[in-house]
């Protein structure tokens, strides 16, 4: 049931406004205020009186409480949707002319995400203690990745923080859209794999043993599919602990190897050679590279600094190694197009557009064009992956069912012939 709530807010001109609003809840009232381009400072039921907490600003140079450090170390990961909403609200409050410390005080009270509320409280304490915005964000690496911190630093240094935050929102939404597309494409194949494994285990552990007893009493010569199925069932029945131990050891060993630099590099390099999957990975990296590079260039970040950010955020060890080589060539005096063209993994289109943009001094514009192009390429490649992967897994499921059908029914045909 709707009721009246009193609010104090700040509009886009930085003016403080207050009044009442009808809403179902406090959260609904806040949402309505944001929809009206008002940044809520306080919202309470019209009949209730609120008391402001007495917050003592930390003096510059004062030691930051231990709990602030712990929040930075132990803060839980937040969803991309929560991070996007946080960035939008941060930009709205900053444009409204509110001080940074007060902004994070408001966000710590208004955000729905508990981890983000704790992070905002910790950032507020750091800012009141005299730290830079970049340093306060960097203290929470599980929430704000290297790219986010680099963008905040660029906005703080150039004085164009609202524009940088707007680009950050675009970047977060862009990457979330790509991840959602890939996750949706893999949902059906995952269901098929689970079905295939379930069918395999059920047939091997419940169906095969019953027929094996019948065939043993009939004393007929068993074909190789039946022999293989019976031996597999016998091994799992008698030595299940070996199978489990070997599987666990294999999984743990593989995960430990993939945590090494060499393991990550080889895994990402071999993935590039897998049909359909390899081109999807390459185009995803190209889209991420172009979008990040364009945004960083427009934010006033140098090419070398942009390559540093890309190396940290590309999430692909093979391409991270290529970016390191590009940086070395740039430091030696090479151009961006020539440096990227000399390493592996980059498409001729990317090199060509980089060359055109570099010569025309419109590098960020060319990268924006390249980003949009590869966004569409990723979408098409995801559709192609779904188109190929589904039938391939259905074929594998059919092979498993055919194997067990032959293992079960071939001896039956021999028994029928024997009876005749």
Image (cartoon, helix red, strand yellow):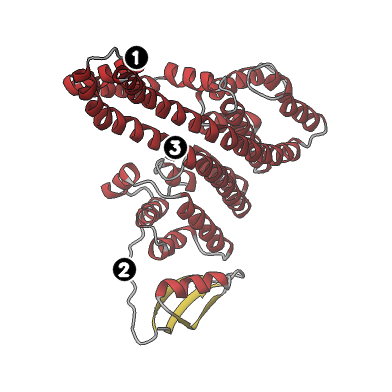
Residue at 61% x, 39% y: name it. Answer: 383
Asked whether disc 1 touches disc 2, contact meaning CB atoms under 8 Å apart, the reply is no
Compare marks 1 and 3 and give the one earlier in the sequence: 3
Residue at 68% x, 22% y: name it. Answer: 340
Which residue is denoted by mark 3 in the rendering?
A: 192
Where on the picture, by quarter, is residue 230?
A: top left
From the viewer's perspective, is residue 120 above or below residue 412? below
How far apart in space, not on screen, are marks 1 and 2 (Cα)? 83 Å
Asked whether disc 2 touches disc 3, contact meaning CB atoms under 8 Å apart, the reply is no
Which residue is denoted by mark 1 in the rendering?
A: 223
Which residue is most to the front?
420
Which residue is denoted by mark 2 in the rendering?
A: 54
Task: Please provide percent x and percent y for residue 126.
Answer: 39, 50
From the viewer's perspective, is residue 30 above or below residue 265? below
Structural crowding at the residue carrying mark 1, measured as other residues with C-alpha within 10 Å and reported as few (<14), some (14–19) or many (≥20) = some
Residue at 44% x, 46% y: name it. Answer: 137
């Amino acid at each position: 049931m709707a009721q009246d709530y009193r609010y104090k807010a700040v509009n886009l001109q930085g003016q403080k406004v207050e009044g009442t609003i009808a809403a179902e809840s406090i959260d609904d009232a806040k949402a309505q205020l944001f929809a009206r381009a008002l940044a809520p400072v306080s919202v309470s039921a019209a009949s209730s009186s609120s008391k402001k907490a007495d917050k003592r600003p930390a003096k510059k140079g004062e030691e930051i409480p231990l709990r602030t450090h712990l929040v930075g170390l132990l803060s839980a990961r937040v969803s991309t949707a929560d991070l996007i909403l946080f960035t939008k609200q941060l930009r709205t409050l900053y444009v409204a002319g509110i001080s940074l410390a007060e902004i994070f005080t408001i966000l710590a009270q208004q955000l729905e995400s508990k981890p983000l509320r704790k992070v905002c409280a910790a950032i507020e304490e750091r800012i009141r203690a005299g730290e830079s915005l970049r340093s306060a964000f960097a203290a929470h690496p599980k929430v704000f990745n290297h790219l986010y911190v680099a963008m905040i630093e660029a906005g703080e240094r150039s004085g164009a923080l609202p524009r940088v935050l707007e680009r950050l929102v675009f970047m977060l939404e862009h990457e979330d859209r790509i991840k959602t597309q890939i996750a949706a494409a893999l949902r059906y194949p995952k269901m098929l794999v689970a079905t295939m494994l379930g069918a395999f285990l059920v047939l091997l552990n419940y169906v095969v043993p019953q027929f094996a007893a019948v065939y043993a009493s009939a004393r007929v010569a068993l074909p190789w599919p039946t022999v293989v199925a019976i031996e597999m069932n016998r091994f799992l029945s008698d030595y299940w602990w070996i199978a489990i131990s070997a599987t666990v050891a294999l999984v743990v060993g593989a995960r430990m190897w993939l945590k090494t630099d060499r393991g990550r590099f080889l895994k990402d390099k071999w993935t590039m050679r897998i049909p359909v999957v390899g081109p999807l990975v390459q185009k995803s990296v190209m889209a991420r590279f172009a979008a990040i590079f364009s945004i960083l260039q427009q934010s006033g970040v140098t090419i070398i600094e942009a390559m540093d950010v890309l190396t940290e955020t590309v999430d692909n060890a093979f391409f991270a190694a290529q970016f390191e080589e590009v940086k070395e060539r740039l430091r030696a005096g090479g151009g961006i197009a020539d440096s990227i063209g000399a390493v592996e993994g980059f498409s001729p289109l990317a090199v060509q557009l980089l060359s055109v943009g570099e010569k025309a001094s419109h590098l960020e514009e060319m990268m924006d064009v390249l980003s949009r192009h590869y966004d569409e390429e990723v979408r098409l490649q995801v559709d192609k992956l779904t188109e190929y992967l589904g039938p391939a897994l259905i074929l594998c499921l059919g092979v498993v069912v055919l194997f067990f059908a032959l293992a079960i029914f071939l001896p039956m045909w021999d028994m029928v012939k024997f009876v005749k």
